[in-house]
Amino acid sequence: MVCRSWEWRPGSDGNCFGESYPIQGPYWGSGSNLEIMKIVRHALRQLKINVTLLNITQMSEFRKDAHTSVFTERKGKLLTKAQRSDPKTFGDCIHWCLPGVPDAWNEILYAYLLKDHRTIL
């Protein structure tokens, strides 16, 4: 999960306002800590029950353009352009626009559920 808008573009002074395209090319955001992911993977293998982790973090971090900040309201009014361009104060890097990234998460989960359970349906 990306909680800081400034990590997408060095020198942007924390501003993801106006972004309209996903990140292109290689990228490893702060939410995708490889060491933590290795620890989680190891811990899951140690469990006495089978647990599958569908890790959507890295995929989601490419979508700098998919957050709801431009639609945020304060006191019943949409943020002004000046407020939207100040993500350190007004940014919302936790919520996502729909349709979009959460739909991809759901499709991955749905595909996983169907993969091993085709005969049930």
Image (tube, rainbow, N blue to C red):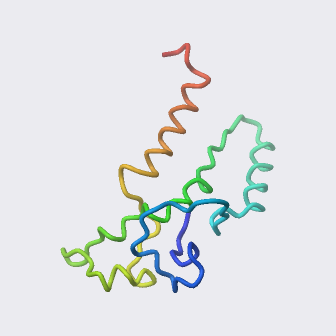
Name above or below for residue 95 compared with residue 112. Answer: below
Compare residues 42 and 107 and report the one nearer the observer.
107
Question: Is 79 left, or right, of 93 in this rendering?
Answer: left
- Residue 19, image x and y in percent? 43, 69
Compare residues 7 and 1 and report the one nearer the observer.
7
- Residue 75, image x and y in percent? 21, 78
Compare residues 115 and 15 and report the one nearer the observer.
15
Q: Residue at x 29, y 81 (%)?
A: 81
Question: Is 71 left, or right, of 57 in this rendering?
Answer: left
- Residue 106, image x and y in percent? 47, 41
Total labels: the figure holds 0
Name above or below for residue 4 compared with residue 114. Answer: below
Q: Residue at x 52, y 86 (%)?
A: 13
- Residue 103, image x and y in percent? 43, 45
Name the image quarter holding residue 76.
bottom left
Compare residues 1 and 20 and report the one nearer the observer.
20
Q: Residue at x 55, y 62 (%)?
A: 23
